[in-house]
Image (cartoon, grey):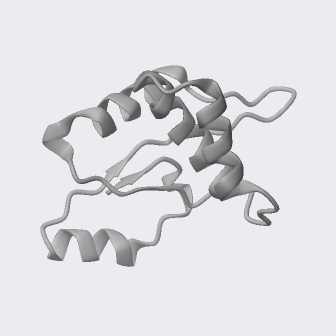
Amino acid sequence: MVCIYPNDLKDQLREYCHDNHTELKEFDIGINKEPFLIMNNNIVKEAIEYCLNVNNHPVLIFSTKGSNQLSCFIGCIRRVQGWHISSIILEYTQFCEDDSNS
C-alpha cells in the first residue's frame, strides 16, 4: 500500500498493516496551491519509482487528501509508462469529474 498524503492517515490502518504483514509506504508529496505551496519533486519521483518497481507489485495507491491529487499522481505514472497525454486526461476525467473530494 502506498499513501501519497499520509498526514491524515489513521493509526488503525498502520496497525492493521503491521498485524497483517502488509507493507505501508508513506510519501508526503505535499500539495500544489497558489501562491506558495508546491509538491516536493524528489518525494514525487521516489514514490513513482517505488510504484513502478515490479518487486513492489501489486500496489494499492491512495491519498487521504482527495481524488484529484491521487489522479494527478497516477497521471504522472502513466506519463512515465509512455501513455499519450490525451489518454491520461481521459482517464483523469473518468475518475475526477464532478468529484467533491478534491
Residue 72 appears at what percent x and percent y? 62, 39
Viewer-proximal residue among 89 and 38 = 89
Residue drawn at (62%, 30%) of the image = 39
- Residue 97 falls left or right of residue 94: right
| Residue located 69% across and 27% down the image | 38
When asked about the image quadrant of residue 89, the answer is top right
Is 85 on the left-hand or right-hand side of 22?
right
In the displayed structure, would residue 83 be above or below residue 11? above
Image vertical order of residue 8 relative to residue 36, above or below: below
Residue located 12% across and 67% down the image: 21
Horizontal placement of 75 versus 26: left or right? Answer: right
For image coordinates 48% across by 47% down, the residue present is 4
Q: Position of residue 33 (x, y in %)?
A: 80, 35
Choose top left, top right, bottom left or bottom right for residue 55. top left
Q: Nearer the viewer, residue 25 or 49?
A: 49
Figure check: 97 above or below 52: below
**Screen quadrant of the N terminus:** bottom left
Question: Image quadrant for the C terminus?
Answer: bottom right
